[in-house]
Image: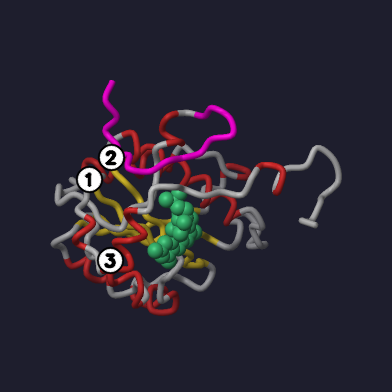
């Protein structure tokens, strides 16, 4: 079956993995195909079924589709660099997690881990639908916290740009276009982060 992901990248695998892990990447240009509310609900549903410590589900999402006030409000919370390209996205959202546990108000040490699992589900559900994701740490956190009225025990972490694969790199300024067209994807090698023994630092 023809992949619905535009793969113009080379992923040098050390070992075979699922096709959707291999072909996912984070574009900054997206096709100009709208993402409907129904599709947003599917993405959220994928996240909803992520595992979490004690099933606390500490993730929270604020979302907005292009052309709506919500989209513009989220866009205004992105940092200057991400605003250069994220206007290409058809859907924007902001991630936060609840820092404390509902049952006793103590710190939920695993909340950030669980938000990561949530996003792992979301990005692979999206990929299977031909929707690319680009996560962003570059967020004006305080502004987002205030803008969307998050209480103090929630922590805004990231934003995410969504859009169908197949964007036009010409939509990007020259430096970002160059990155978009770079063929080879890079990762640390397994021996640098996984140890069948004591922790090791690189010599
Ligand atoms: C938590 C997180 C924060 C990121 N922040 C930004 C960001 O602010 N701006 C940006 O352009 N890319 C950002 N990225 C994208 C990464 O640079 C990208 O995922 C990484 O280079 C690997 O590329 P790939 O996703 O195409 O495999 C972020 C990714 C993650 C997971």
Structural distance between the alpha carbons of marks 3 and 1: 15 Å
Label 2: few (<14), some (14–19) or many (≥20) C-alpha neighbours in 10 Å:
some
Which label sits on residue 6?
Answer: 2
Residue at 30% across, 58% down:
28
- Nearer to us in this view, 104 or 29: 29
Residue at 30% across, 37% down:
5
Measuring from the top left, give residue 51's x and y in whole percent: 55, 39
Q: Which residue is under mark 3?
A: 85
Measuring from the top left, give residue 6's x and y in whole percent: 28, 40
Structural distance between the alpha carbons of marks 3 and 2: 19 Å
Asked if labels 2 and 3 touch by Cβ distance under 8 angstroms, the answer is no
Classify 72 as above or below 54.
Answer: below
Task: State whether label 3 is within 8 Å of ligand 1.
Answer: yes
Which label sits on residue 125?
Answer: none
Q: What stretch is highlighted in magenta?
A: 1-17
Ligand 1 quadrant in view: bottom left
Asked if labels 2 and 1 touch by Cβ distance under 8 angstroms, the answer is yes
Structural distance between the alpha carbons of marks 1 and 2: 6 Å
Q: Is the magenta stretch mostly helix, strand or loop?
A: loop
Q: Give the number of the mark in front: 3 or 2.
A: 2
Q: Does the magenta stretch include residue 16?
A: yes
- Nearer to us in this view, 54 or 84: 84
Sequence-wise, the earlier of marks 3 and 1 is: 3
Classify 163 as above or below 105.
Answer: above
Residue at 19% across, 62% down:
171
Residue at 80% across, 37% down:
196
Quadrant where the image shows the N terminus: top left
């Amino acid at each position: 079956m023809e992949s619905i992901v535009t793969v113009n990248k080379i992923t040098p695998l050390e070992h075979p993995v699922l096709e959707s892990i291999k072909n996912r990447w984070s574009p900054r240009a997206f096709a100009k195909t709208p993402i409907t509310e129904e599709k947003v609900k599917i993405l959220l549903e994928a996240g909803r079924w992520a595992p979490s410590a004690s099933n606390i589900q500490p993730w929270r999402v604020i979302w907005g589709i292009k052309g709506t006030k919500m989209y513009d409000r989220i866009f205004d919370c992105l940092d200057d660099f991400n605003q250069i390209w994220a206007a290409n996205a058809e859907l924007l959202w902001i991630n936060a997690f609840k820092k404390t546990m509902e049952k006793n108000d103590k710190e939920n040490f695993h909340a950030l881990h669980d938000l990561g699992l949530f996003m792992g589900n979301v990005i692979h559900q999206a990929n299977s639908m031909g929707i690319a994701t680009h996560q962003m740490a570059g967020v004006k956190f305080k502004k987002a916290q205030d803008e969307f009225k998050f209480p103090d025990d929630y922590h805004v972490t990231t934003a995410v740009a969504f859009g169908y694969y197949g964007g036009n790199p010409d939509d990007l300024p020259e430096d970002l276009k160059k990155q978009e067209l770079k063929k080879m994807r890079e990762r640390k090698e397994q021996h640098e982060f996984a140890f069948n023994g004591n922790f090791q630092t690189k010599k």
